[in-house]
Image (spheres, rainbow, N blue to C red):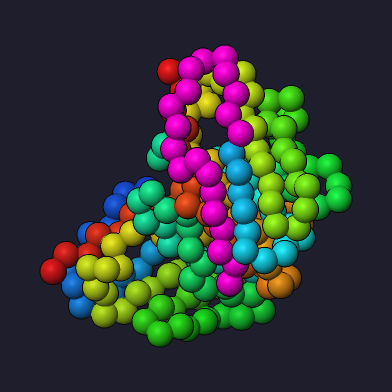
Amino acid sequence: SAVISQKPSRDICQRGTSLTIQCQVDSQVTMMFWYRQQPGQSLTLIATANQGSEATYESGFVIDKFPISRPNLTFSTLTVSNMSPEDSSIYLCSVEQGHKNIQYFGAGTRLSVL
Amino acid sequence: SQKIEQNSEALNIQEGKTATLTCNYTNYSPAYLQWYRQDPGRGPVFLLLIRENEKEKRKERLKVTFDTTLKQSLFHITASQPADSATYLCALDNSNSGYALNFGKGTSLLVTP
């Protein structure tokens, strides 16, 4: 199974600033996903990031607010731009490995926006 | 719209008993259904996957059933232990996004000694 490292694990940010979250995988994977988990809520898919193509965003999420990079098969970043308190949440990256439909998750980034 | 519903109330059971968690879905025709475990401060961890043509799947003390007619999955933990205390998430394939998943809100399980 893939091992995923996310940085930072948590951060407190000021309104209007941006934060970039990094996701590093210990093996090459084609598909990476970014999710958001708001307090007491389920995980909500933000976007799918495949290497070599533009990220595909789910309804309600836009590239200007959540730009994603996927420079290679082991790394991705998600930026939360122009943050507001409503962006306070846990952000998780995951990968699908081996076409078995199983996902492996990082520990998440807990973001608080003041 | 597609919905996944899990018991929102926490489930408290005594050690040694069997815990049963429910996942109901609507407006889905999933090819498979998965269960994950999430501990505080951690990402979800995969437990079991069951396909639409499978009725039941077992792994050690875990058992999952999948009834596509009722649109329901049951997740059982037999001989429960305090270490089983966590939130359990049901997930279905996101038909719009390839291998991405849609998750339920999860059910919190507390096993007391």
Which residue is drawn at the image coordinates 49% and 47% (left, top)? Answer: A108
Say if residue B110 shows up in the picture.
yes
Q: How many dots with numbers? A: 0
Instruction: Name which quarter of the figure residue A11 lies in.
Output: top left
Which residue is drawn at the image coordinates 50% and 40% (left, top)? Answer: A8
In the picture, measured across the screen, residue B82 lies left or right of residue B50, that is left
* Quarter in which the N terminus of chain B is drawn: top right
Residue occupying the far right of the picture: A52
Which residue is drawn at the image coordinates 60% and 43% (left, top)? Answer: A22
Say if residue B26 shows up in the picture.
no
Residue A108 colored magenta?
A: no
Residue occupying the far top of the picture: A16
Q: Position of residue A109 (x, y in %)?
A: 49, 41
Magenta part of the protein: which range?
A1-20
Relative to residue A103, is residue B41 depicted above or below? above
Instruction: Name which quarter of the figure residue A56 lies in.
Output: top right
Relative to residue B72, is residue B1 depicted above or below? above
Along the viewing direction, whichever of B109 and A107 lies nearer the viewer: A107
Q: Position of residue B54 (x, y in %)?
A: 61, 80
Residue A9 colored magenta?
A: yes
In the picture, measured across the screen, residue B14 lies left or right of residue B25, that is left
Q: Position of residue A52 (x, y in %)?
A: 86, 50
In the picture, measured across the screen, residue B29 lies left or right of residue B84, that is right
Along the viewing direction, whichever of B93 and A61 lies nearer the viewer: A61
Along the viewing direction, whichever of B16 and A84 lies nearer the viewer: A84
* Quarter in which the C terminus of chain B is drawn: bottom left
Which residue is drawn at the image coordinates 40% and 85% (left, top)? Answer: B60
Q: Position of residue B20 (x, y in %)?
A: 35, 68
Instruction: Name which quarter of the figure residue B98 lies in.
Output: bottom right
Along the viewing direction, whichever of B113 and B7 lies nearer the viewer: B113
